[in-house]
Amino acid sequence: MADRLVDEAEWIRRCAQWSEHPEREEFPPGGGQVTLTIDEQDPKNPTEDRFTSKRFHKALSVTLNSVGFRSGGQDLTTAGTYIEMVSRLLEPALPAFAVLAVRGRVKR
């Protein structure tokens, strides 16, 4: 296993050197050929109905998650997503309610 780590470290070192001076050395280190294949089609703009409820919902959720609600990264159902958003809105109010409850008990 140590030999493999040494080999990988050597390969990374050679790649770093090549990236600094690509005209001098071969890539990948040790020779060979690199082939990149992309299976996906190029993205296209929608040609039919651009404003659908599905697109609106997706745009709204992306905007809310990036601006106000940092989602946990879990794949939740629609209901779970909205429950998470509501809980994130109400979380700051819970300590305030606790302080008011303690204050009410102390006043008596």
Image (spheres, grey):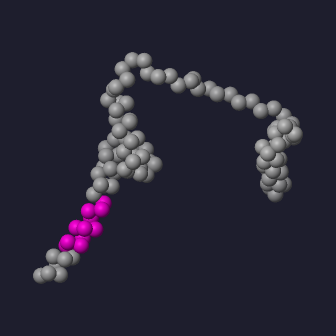
Indicate whether 16 appears above or below 58: below
Q: Quadrant of residue 59?
A: top left
Question: Relative to 68, is 33 above or below?
Answer: above
| Tally of numbered tags | 0
Q: Residue at x 24, y 70 (%)?
A: 98
Q: Position of residue 58 (x, y in %)?
A: 38, 35
Relative to residue 73, is residue 9 drawn left or right? right
**In magenta segment, residue 25:** no
| In-front residue for pair 5/30 | 30
Q: Quadrant of the C terminus?
A: bottom left
Residue located farthest toward the top when viewing the structure as drawn: 48
* Part of the protein shown in magenta: 91-101
Q: Is residue 23 visible?
A: yes
In this view, 55 is above or below 95: above
Query: Residue at horizontal 16%, vertical 78%?
Result: 105
Q: Is residue 95 magenta?
A: yes
Residue 7 location, x and y as percent?
83, 50
Q: Position of residue 101 (x, y in %)?
A: 19, 73
**Dividing the picture into quarters, in which one does residue 5 lie?**
bottom right
Apparent side of residue 36 relative to residue 10 in the rendered image (left or right): left
- Say whether residue 33 is left or right of residue 42: right
Quadrant including the N terminus:
bottom right
Q: Residue at x 82, y 43 (%)?
A: 21
Q: Nearer the viewer, residue 82 or 16?
A: 16
Closer to us: 68 or 106 = 68
What residue do we see at 34% from left, 25% from top?
51
The answer to whether residue 15 is visible is no
Q: Main secondary structure of the magenta part?
A: helix
